[in-house]
Image: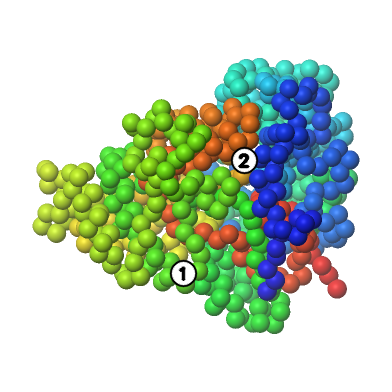
Amino acid sequence: MRILKILNNCGRVRVISVIAALTCGVAAMPLTTLAEPSHGLAIYGKPALSPDFSHLPYANPKAPKGGAIRLAEPGGFDSLKPWVLKGNAAWGVGVHVTETLAMRSIDEPFTVYGLLAETIDTAPDRSWVEFTLRPEARFSDGSPVTVEDVMWSYRTLGTKGHPRYLGTWSKVASMEQTGPRSVKFTFTEQDRELPLLMGLRPILKKSQWEGQDFSDSSLEPPIGTGPYVIDKVDPGRAISFRRNPDYWGKDLPLMAGMNNFDTIRYDYFGDANAMFEAFKAGEVNAWRELSAQNWDSEYDFPLATSGGIVKDQIPNERPSGIMGLVMNTRNPIFDDWRVRQAMIEMFNYRFINRTLNGGDDPRITSYFSNSVLAMSHGPASGRVADLLEPFAADLPPGTIEGYALPEGSERPMDRAAVRRALALMADAGWTVQDGRLADAEGRPFTFEILLNQSGSAMRTGSETQQIVNIYVEALRPLGITPRITLLDSAQYVERTNNYQFDMTWYERGLSLSPGNEQRLYWGGEGVTTPGSRNWMGMDSPAAEAMIDAMVTSEEAEDYTAAVKALDRVLTAGRYVIPVNFSPFSRLAHSADLKYPDEIPIYGDWPGFLPEVWWQETN
């Protein structure tokens, strides 16, 4: 097993690069600098790569082309249209088939480089952004990408697409064609992130979808500009993508060393156990191991012991994000922070982590833990305290004073936690009556835990069930017996999109450049609007204000303080019962699959596997 370390030129671990990008860049480029068309755009300062860069630092321009990779996905799919709320779209369509005006570098906190766009121009105050298309940009059918396609795509996605597109589109005051290949967006409000976000919407071919109800799901293969086209589709079971030899952008420096496989195939399986068995048999070429315990004990199968499988650990510098059991505050029983704290107290993390994971991985202590954006766990101070002070009267205890999760016990029952939970429940009006928890009118405290039997991106179905089973047993001393409901992926997506659950498994990956997407995660509109990521149903003026402060900050220090303040609001809100995370990805893969020595700061993140990997043949 090789464990990679990310080093800078001085030989130090490159976590400093994140801090430098968020601080030093502002001094390097004052906000008063006049704007001019550029090859890229950074949230603060200048892009790290100069206009004449030859390749992304985490791509190998000498990587050979050819070969194939087979990957596994849980559940199934019934749509090839990932841009709408309806249907369960196949993975990979939005990644391999369509492209955007600009492309993120996963080696910088938030920088985009022109992809379909040759240049990007923005006002010094970021009140507008203009993109000029590359003249050579083409769809896979050979037709040119036009400003008309761009404007139609933005308008359609913003009005009929998935709700995730609505927030940014609602801030566009005008969209106008300013030249044969140029389009300009003017914004309704100050928001430094908007010019970058506007470059990250998929560009679709207007003539393919015009006249149809775009909000409907569809199995019609989309015509895109990306390096791959859809090759074969077996609905619900498999989808494969074929590298387009006539791909318009294959000679761009941005694409050097990227998209190396001739074929990328995703096979769908009923659950993670079936996926892992397929990997052991060599039918799947890469596997992200989510359990530290399994990583140490489950790789003695023939393909691994013979050297056909390699185990690598891919480090990263990104936030832990949040993962665990989320409580839906749309259900009145979870609307009280004391009840939510009691539920957290009863989750004996130390025992669960030792039992299921060997106790190796650290716990998620806040939404941005493991990063320079994480809150401190003591009292808020400085700019963070100033931002939170106007909302002090309405914030849950601990937001400003400091909040930390209970430590738990190595025994199955944490008696001290039970006592604390009973006291919190009594304060909230719930007491144990005849062996069950009930309110003053005798109505029992009951709820449902909803689970996807296929698992999730970060946990197998069996793992989440094991965690929940231990948790359900731990709740018995409180007189609580939740019911557990297992659903297939389609039913689970339908119910969670419409917030029809009390408690469920929740995962949100967070970046080093949080911004407008945080409204989709935690904004008040998500309380009633279907399809948001605000599964907890939080409606917090303080969270909204912190997001406003983030996207309007003109100094990196103010931005970081706003994120730290938001982290406090989320963590002390006690919406999620967090579990463990790993500061690196455990990737087992076929020995003939290779990746560059230079690992991006985001590590194993969208844009890494399979994009910069290749197959090495003898």
Residue 532 screen position, x and y as percent = 48, 37
Mark 2 vs 1: CB contact within 8 A = no
Residue 151 screen position, x and y as percent = 70, 24
Query: Label 2 to label 1, Cα distance in Å?
Result: 30 Å
In the rendered image of this protein, does residue 81 appear above or below residue 389?
below
Q: Which of 320/593 is in front?
A: 320
Q: Secondary structure under badge 2? A: loop
Tell me the quadrant of the picture where the N terminus can be found.
bottom right
Name the residue at 81% across, 30% down: 38
Tell me the quadrant of the picture where the C terminus can be found.
bottom right
Horizontal side of residue 469 vs 612, given as left or right: left
Query: In this view of the protein, can residue 281 be seen by the observer?
Result: yes
Total numbered labels: 2
Q: Which of 221/294 is in front?
A: 294
In the rendered image of this protein, does residue 227 appear above or below residue 148?
below
Q: Secondary structure under badge 1? A: loop
Q: Amino acid at mark 1?
A: Gly
Q: Amino acid at mark 2?
A: Ser
Q: Earlier in the sequence, mark 2 or mark 1?
A: 1
Name the residue at 70% across, 65% down: 4
Residue 494 screen position, x and y as percent = 45, 44
Residue 513: mark:
2
- Label 1 Cα crowd, 10 Å radius (few <14 / some 14-19 / many 20+): some
Q: Which of 112/151 is in front?
A: 112
Residue 182 screen position, x and y as percent = 79, 23
Q: Which residue is mark 1?
A: 359
